[in-house]
Amino acid sequence: MAKTMAVNAGSSSLKFQLLEMPAEQVIAQGVIERIGMDDAIVTIKYDSEVEGLIDDSEDEDHITFSKNGKDKKYENVLAMKDHQQAINFMLQKLTDLGIIEDFNEITGVGHRVVAGGEWFNHSVVVNDSVLEKIDRLADYAPLHNPANAMGIRAFQKLLPDALSVAVFDTSFHQSMPEENYLYSLPYEYYTRYGARKYGAHGTSHRYVAMRAAEMLGKDLKSLKLITLHLGAGASITAIKDGKSLDTSMGFSPLAGVTMATRSGDVDPSLVYYIQEREGLSNDDMLNILNKKSGLLGLSTISSDMRDLLDVQDTNDHARLAVKIFINRIIKYIGQYIAEMGGVDAIVFTAGIGENSIPVRQAIIDKLEYFNVSLDIEANKIRGKEVEISTKSSRVKALLIPTNEELMIARDVESLK
Ligand code: ADP
C-alpha cells in the first residue's frame, strides 16, 4: 500500500512520521537525534497491530511495549555519521520491523522547509530549481534551510522514485497585504534584501484554521479567526477570508510575543544600547535574544511554562514571566480584532495552548470585553479538539491540537 512520509530535518536531528494515505493513518513516527555523533539516538514508535507486521528477533533487545500493550517502541544508540546514513538506517529499520515491505512502498516524501521567502506561496514538487532556491534562502534561515535541503537530497538519493515535496513554514503568510508585511524602513531595503515580514508556523496555523471551520460547521472563507500557536516558539495569526492577514513573527521567528527563550518584540535601539554596554558581538547579542530571553530570561529559572506555573505562587520572577507572556498575547489579540473588524473564534494550539488549562483561562478571562466566555469544565482538558467557550459566548474559543505532519502528507497527496 502507498505510504507518505512527513519529514522535519534539523542540523543534527531528523523527525519523521509515516502515514497511510489517503486514509491518513499514522503507521510509525520517530526521531533520530545527535546525527554526526558516535552516540546518535534512534527512536521509532509504531502500532504493533498494523497488518502485515513481522518482528525481527535481532531487534528484540531494543523493542519495548507501551502500557496499552499495543504500541511498540524501538530505541537504539549508535554512531551516525551524517543525514544520509541516518535516513538509510531509518528506512532499513522500518523494513526490518515489518512496518514497510520495501522502500518503494513510500511513494511520497513531504519536507518541512522553514524559509520560502517570496518565491513560494504554496507547497511545491521539488526539482533542481526549487532546491537551488531553498539553498539561496539560507540567508533568511541560516540554521534551518541548509538542514532542510540536506534532508531533501538524502531522501532523493535513497527514494529516487518517490515524489519529493517542499512544504514551507512561511507560505501560508504570503497572503499578507503589503501594509502588514512591510516594516517602516527605507523601501530600498525591501527591494534590495527582501527585508519584510515572512512569519512562521504557517503549516500549523493553516491546519488549525481549517479544523476550526470544520468544528464550527462554517466555511473557512466566511470566518475571522485568531490562531494562537503557543509552543516553545509562539506565534499568533489573524486569518480572514481563509487567508493569513497578519502574523506576529517577523523577518525571522524572533519577533512577536514572549516565547520560551526568544524575546519577541523589542525596541531595536535597546538592543544596540545593551550590546554597546556589555561589549557583545552581533552573534552574542542574537544568541541572547534567541536563547536566553523570553520566559527563561525573565524568570531566571526555566523556559518551560510548566515549571513557572508550578512555582508562581512563591516565586515573583516566575509570576512576572507568566504575566508578561499572557499580556503580550492579549495585546496581539486586541490588535488583530481591530485589524479584522471583529473575530468569530480564537484557537489554542501547540504545547502550551493544547495543555495549559490556567494559561488558556487567563487569556480568555482578559477578553471578556469582546464577549468570549470560558466554559470552565470544558477547559479542563488537554490535547483534544474541544470548544472551550460557553454556548452563549458570541466569540468561540477552541482547543485544537496541531498536526503539521498530516498537513504535509495532505500536500504531498494533492501534488501527486
Ligand atoms: P516546540 O515549539 O518545541 O514544538 P511544543 O509545541 O512542543 O514546542 O511546546 C513545548 C512547550 O509546551 C514546553 O516548553 C512547555 O512550556 C509547554 N507545555 C507542555 N505541556 C504543558 C502543560 N501541561 N502546561 C503548561 N505548559 C506545557
Image (spheres, helix red, strand yellow):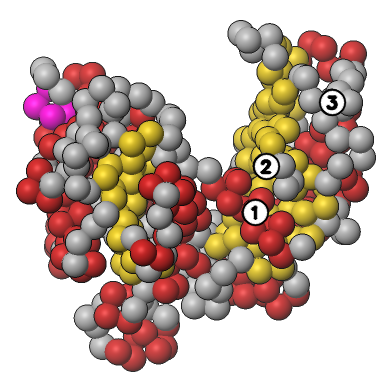
User: Residue 381 at x, y = what percent?
Assistant: 35, 24
Q: Amino acid at mark 2?
A: Glu
Mark sitting earlier along the chain (2/3):
2
Residue 169 against residue 388 in the figure, above or below: below
Earlier residue among tags 1 and 2: 2
Q: Are marks 1 and 2 in contact (CB under 8 Å)?
A: yes
Task: Name which residue type carries label 3.
Answer: Glu
Q: Please state which of residues 325 and 188 is positioned toward the viewer in this rendering.
A: 325
Question: Residue 360 in the image: x percent, y percent?
Answer: 25, 35
Identify the image quadrant of the N terminus. Answer: top right
Using the image as rendered, state which of residue 52 and residue 393 is in the foreground: 393
N-terminal-most mark, 1 or 3: 3
What is the quadrant of residue 69 in the picture?
A: top right
- The answer to whether residue 130 shows anywhere in this view is yes
Q: Amino acid at mark 1?
A: Arg
Q: Is residue 285 visible from the viewing direction of this image?
A: no
Q: Nearer the viewer, residue 179 or 339?
A: 339
Indicate whether 245 appears above or below 317: below
Q: Give above or below for 257 relative to 353.
A: below
Q: Which residues are magenta?
A: 315-319
- Classify mark 3: helix, strand or loop: loop
Residue tagged 2:
24
Label 2 Cα crowd, 10 Å radius (few <14 / some 14-19 / many 20+): some
Residue at point 67%, 73% (across, down): 130
Residue 188: % across, % down: 33, 91
The label shown at residue 410 is 1
Give the residue number, with chain letter if any, for mark 3.
51
Q: What secondary structure is found at the residue carrying circle 2?
A: loop
Q: Nearer the viewer, residue 319 or 39?
A: 319
Is residue 253 in the magenta section?
A: no
